Image: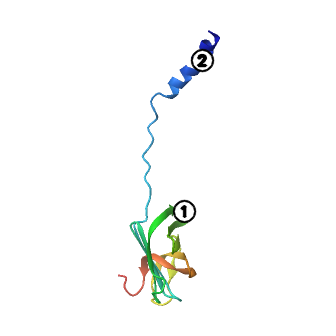
Amino acid sequence: MKKAILLTPVLSLLLVACGDKAQDAPVTEEKLSEYKAIGTEPGWAVEVNGDEIIYSSMEATNDFTLPVQRMTKTATGWEVKGFSDQHNITLTITSGTECSDGMSDRVYADTVRTAVSGTGYLDGCGGEILSGPDTP
C-alpha cells in the first residue's frame, strides 16, 4: 500500500510531462548554395555548387570534386569542408572583408583561405565582384 501511495505523485508528474508539447519553431538551416573563390600565386579556384566543392589549380595536377561534408555559418562568414580517402579541403570565408586578387584589378566582397591536401594553405578572394573591369 505504501508503494502505491508513493508512486501516485510520481505517475501524476509523468502524465503532466507527457501532455501537449510546446510548438517549436521550424529550424531552417542556412546553406551556401553557390560560391566561387580564386587565388593567385599559385593560381587556383574553388567552387561550391550545391552539395559539391570543386577545387582546380593552374597545374591541374591535384584537381578534385568532393561532396560537401560540413557547411557551417560562423560569426565571420562560412566554413565549408569536403573530404574523401584521397583528398580534403576546408574553405574559410570571411564575409564583408574586401579583397583584391592582385592581377585583374577586381575587388571581391570576401577574403578566403583554403586548406587543400597536398598543397597547404592558399589565400584568395571570393563572393560578389564589387568593382573591376567587368562590373557595371
Q: Give me the disc on residue 37.
A: none
User: Residue at left 43%, top 65%?
Assistant: 32
- Which of the two labelled residues, at mark 2 and mark 1, occupies the earlier sequence position? 2
| Camera-side mark, 2 or 1 | 2
Q: Residues within 10 Å of mark 1 (few under 14, many from 20)?
A: few
**Percent position of residue 49, x then y:** 39, 70
**Percent position of residue 107, x then y:** 47, 81
Quadrant location, the N terminus: top right
Q: Is residue 131 left or right of residue 5?
A: left
Look at the image and tell me whether residue 19 can be seen: yes
Model colouring: rainbow
**Percent position of residue 73, x then y:** 51, 62
Query: What amino acid is found at the position of numbered circle 1 in the picture?
Result: Thr
Query: What amino acid is found at the position of numbered circle 2 in the picture?
Result: Leu
- Asked if 82 appears above or below 57 in the picture, the reply is above
User: Residue at left 51%, top 68%?
Assistant: 81
**Percent position of residue 52, x then y:** 41, 69
- Asked if 98 appears above or below 58 in the picture, the reply is above
Q: Residue furthest front?
A: 85
Q: Residue furthest top?
A: 1
Which element type, helix, strand or loop, lies under badge 1? loop
Total marks in image: 2
Q: In this figure, which residue is indicated by the disc labeled 1? A: 74
Closer to the camera in the image, 24 or 16: 16
In the figure, residue 94 lies in which quadrant? bottom right
Q: In this figure, which residue is indicated by the disc labeled 2? A: 7
In the figure, residue 113 lies in which quadrant? bottom right
Which element type, helix, strand or loop, lies under badge 2? helix
Alpha carbon separation for disc pair 2 and 1:
48 Å
Q: Is residue 93 left or right of residue 65?
A: right
